[in-house]
Image: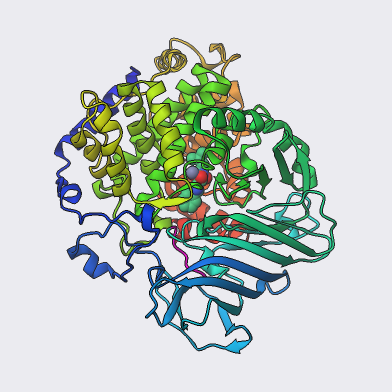
Amino acid sequence: MININKARLKHLLAIVTIGVLSLCMFACSPKSQNTAETGLSPNTETTVESSTYSQIDANTDYHSFANPSDAIVKHIDLDLTADFTQKQLIGTATLTFELVNSNAKQLVLDTRNLDIKGVTSNGQTVNYVLKPADENLGSALHIDVDTNMSEVTIEYATSPSASGVQWLTPAQTAGKKHPFLFTQAQAIHARSFIPLQDSPQVRVTYNATIRTPNELIAVMSAANEPNTPRDGVYEFIMPQPIPSYLIALAIGDLEFKAMGERTGVYAEPSVLDSAALEFEDTESMLIVTEEKYGDYSWDRYDLLILPPSFPFGGMENPRLSFITPTVIAGDKSLVALIAHELAHSWSGNTITNATWRDLWLNEGFTTYLTYRIMEIIYGTDRFNMEAVLGYQDLLADIESLPSQDQIMAIDLRGRNPDDVFSNIPYEKGALFLREIEQKIGRDNFDKFLLQYFEDFAFQSITTDDFVAYLDKTLLAQYPDALDKERVAKWIFEPGIPEGAPIPESDAFDNIDTKRTAWLQQDKVAGSIDTSNWTVHEWLYFLNNMPEQLSDEQLTQLDDAFSLTQSKNNEIAHSWLLIAVKNEYKPAYDRLYSYLTSIGRNKLVKPLYRELSKTSEGKAFAKKAFDEAKPGYHPLTVRANEGFVE
Ligand code: BES
Ligand code: ZN
């Protein structure tokens, strides 16, 4: 057990014990109908007011207006031109659908800020109504359909400020010569660039023709042709059905380099070689994951390296994960991100959360798989360190989040999923699975996962479906090791259940000893032997410093270890956060350039939040934010603008 965790853990247990959320949410929720079997669910439009009074319907996607139980879209044909001058995607989406309910009169789609120019079916004009916009959900598009129709074509253009598309100027790219475009659809932004049923309960195959300026290449979450000639017209086929949040497009001055038989990387030319080297273990990751959890379903696994404004670390777009360049550290220290996005090929892309309440089914399983992949490829010491760091992130969130947001099956009614991003679905989900693994044995749990991935492949399931499945499988097989109440506690209650498996690392115990000696002035910083420290050890050393450090202490650390100049973006982040907390001014130039050159929300948001706590800090933050804003993704703008107001 690590010293620093002990105090935090006590605090945490106190929270858990006083957590008074009753089990009623679990026990009283309406009997779930198996979405995995039907693929469908009733959909009601719930407002914030009614949500506070009513029970959640586990099968309802509260973040879509679509009516898949009346008419369900099965395939999409896109023909889009990327106009970099107007910052618009312009063209058509043809949706092939099945009338599930023969009395249904309308196909209801999700849209956000789309300019709808007309709707036709086989050349005939079709009536439609675009409803007024809801702030979080956008505008429902009601299209009249009848039993003779099986497809509609919507002619439209996206808005230059579409929430799911970022248009970058040449200056915002690595090469500085060509513009760049990328989409980010998860959770509910696909509707800002395609009119569709934007619910993870609906899976579609798609074909696309993408027209670009001649010198650029387009890539999608589909079959890509690495040696395609640059002629401005690119064709894509996605033969496996995927949920809308996995539809993705990027356009830029891209080149391809193979890393293995089934893996490769797309990036701007100046980034290509360093990315291919950094991520050269991707092929091995793919092989070991297949060995444990079943065949890879998606043919190839390639990476696309985005410009630094990409708002996430990574996004698991099938066949082509989108990756931030901020993890190219030169030493593979941050490649857990690749293991994570790859693991989603099983947990998330083949078995998908049916609603955003069930996100933990995607992220918790993926985080668990990430740890397992990392342990196999990089060994137990590294795995232990990463697990402790993940656990500490979780503890920090549990200390700061209101109790209802510490629940894995979170109530998101009336809320924007973007505003509720935390470590809960990730690390709490993974810890829950780790506990099951430890109670029934690793081999048995691996067998279960293999079967789970097979049983639900290409389906979308709710938390309730998962609980029912667990009931029939592991709970029945291992009644002495597992019980229903404990499962419910993990999934439907805040905090971390008492007795959860706490990650530990011997290497970190050693770091604690050294930090303590330094803080007690038994040692000067320059005499700490850090020659063998990995990035993880540095992160642990920094992240567990006391809140307040003196100028002398900070100067000593910086002089000894050049932390302000760290080239590792995660170490720089941890150090800059300490600098802001203690107003250590020598780091502020770096802080400014960090905030204005990186748009990854996880790295900038804690810095803005901390800066906003003092008026001087806020003024500094505002200056950086105003300069960076034209280059930030809409998600990063939205997440941080409140800190500089
Ligand atoms: N699918 C997520 C990103 C995401 C989640 C986008 C929810 C929108 C809504 C992706 O797989 C992810 O989890 N990325 C993490 C990486 C990680 C935990 C290693 C990130 O971007 O930080
Ligand atoms: Zn993820």
Residue interval drawn in magenta: 196-200
Residue 600 visible to an observer of this rendering: yes
Left or right: where 107 falls relative to 317: left
In this rendered view, identify the residue nearer to me: 451 or 485: 451
| Relative depth, front residue between 414 and 239 | 239
Residue 112 is one of the magenta-drawn residues: no
Q: Is 630 above or below relative to 26?
A: below
Lateral position of residue 452 relative to residue 44, left or right: right
The figure's colour scheme reads rainbow
Majority secondary structure in the magenta region: loop
For the C terminus, the quadrant is: bottom left
Q: Nearer the viewer, residue 140 or 480?
A: 480
Q: Quadrant of residue 476?
A: top left
In percent of width and height, residue 503 lies at 38, 23
| Residue located at (51% from left, 14% from top) | 524
Residue 197 shown left or right of residue 489 in the figure: right
In which image quadrant can residue 341 be found? Answer: top right
Q: Position of residue 149 (x, y in %)?
A: 52, 80
Look at 71% across and 42% down and name the residue there: 265
Can the viewer see residue 581 in this picture?
Answer: no
Image quadrant holding the N terminus, namely top left
Q: How far from the left and from the top, in percent, is residue 578? A: 47, 35
x then y, percent, for residue 437? 36, 25
Q: How many marks?
A: 0
Identify whether 17 is placed above or below 188: above
**Residue 581 sits in quarter:** top left
Identify the residue shown where x is 63% and y is 68%.
77
- Image vertical order of residue 438 relative to residue 338, above or below: above
Nearer the observer, 469 or 435: 469
